[in-house]
Amino acid sequence: MNFKDRLQQDFSTMTLVLIPVAIVLNIVVGQIASTLSLPIFLDSIGTVLIALLAGPWVGALTGLLTNLIWGLISDPITAAFAPVAMVIGLVAGLLARAGLFRQWWQAILSGAIIAIALSFVAVPIRVYMFGGVTGSGADFVTAYLLAVGRDLFSSVIITVISSNLLDKVVTAVLAWAIVKALSKRFVARFPRATAVVGN
């Protein structure tokens, strides 16, 4: 199967219907977590979920659209991190394809890998676009590290990885659990999901 055929398979009618659902899930759950001042973001559950079902390209698009839409309706800073959201979806889909979402412990490992991968994109955005400060609770970690003598770049690296590690592990495990709980009939509509649930 060539690349074009794979894309057509990934972006099926069912997938196109689910993308808006995943975007709404990201925004609603993320907004609830923010309102409740939870120590985790939970704003990429829909992205990881659809990446497990439909593959990395669908996950990347969902992440991108989530942040752009969210940025337009409430928080412009969120739009600046759209490339980070794309990386989350892309990496989650690639890890699922590699068989790293079959068991709960693999979902934990995948969440950690996603947190590290996104830091390569998030750190430059935080440093060069926002001077390390984005208005999130994680800014306190950056401020503390700067106060004890660390440079801005290393402070932001530590902040990004530490603030995302728990969040992406929880997100990956929740998305894995949701896919496992779905009916076999529904999951059968997504060929990519066999890498998570098996044949």
Image (spheres, rainbow, N blue to C red):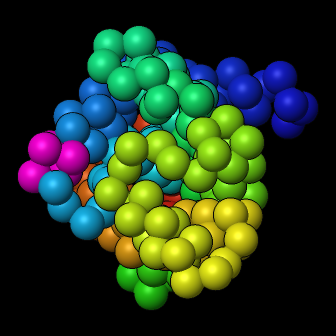
Nearest the camera: 189 or 36? 36
Q: In the figure, is residue 120 to the left or right of 110?
A: right
Q: Quadrant of the N terminus?
A: top right
* Magenta highlight range: 32-36
Residue 37 in view in this figure? yes
Tell me the quarter of the picture where residue 91 sits.
bottom right
Whether residue 52 is situated above or below residue 176 in the rendered picture: above
Whether residue 48 is situated above or below residue 17 in the rendered picture: below
Name of the residue lying farthest toward the top: 72
Whether residue 154 is situated above or below residue 36 in the rendered picture: below
Tell me the quarter of the picture where residue 94 sits.
bottom right
Nearest the camera: 72 or 134? 134
Task: Name the residue: 45% across, 87% down.
Answer: 105
Whether residue 23 is situated above or below residue 173 in the rendered picture: above
Name of the residue lying farthest toward the right: 2
- Asked if residue 167 lies in the magenta stretch, the reply is no
Q: Majority secondary structure of the magenta segment?
A: helix
Q: Position of residue 17 (x, y in %)?
A: 38, 19
Residue 58 in view in this figure? no
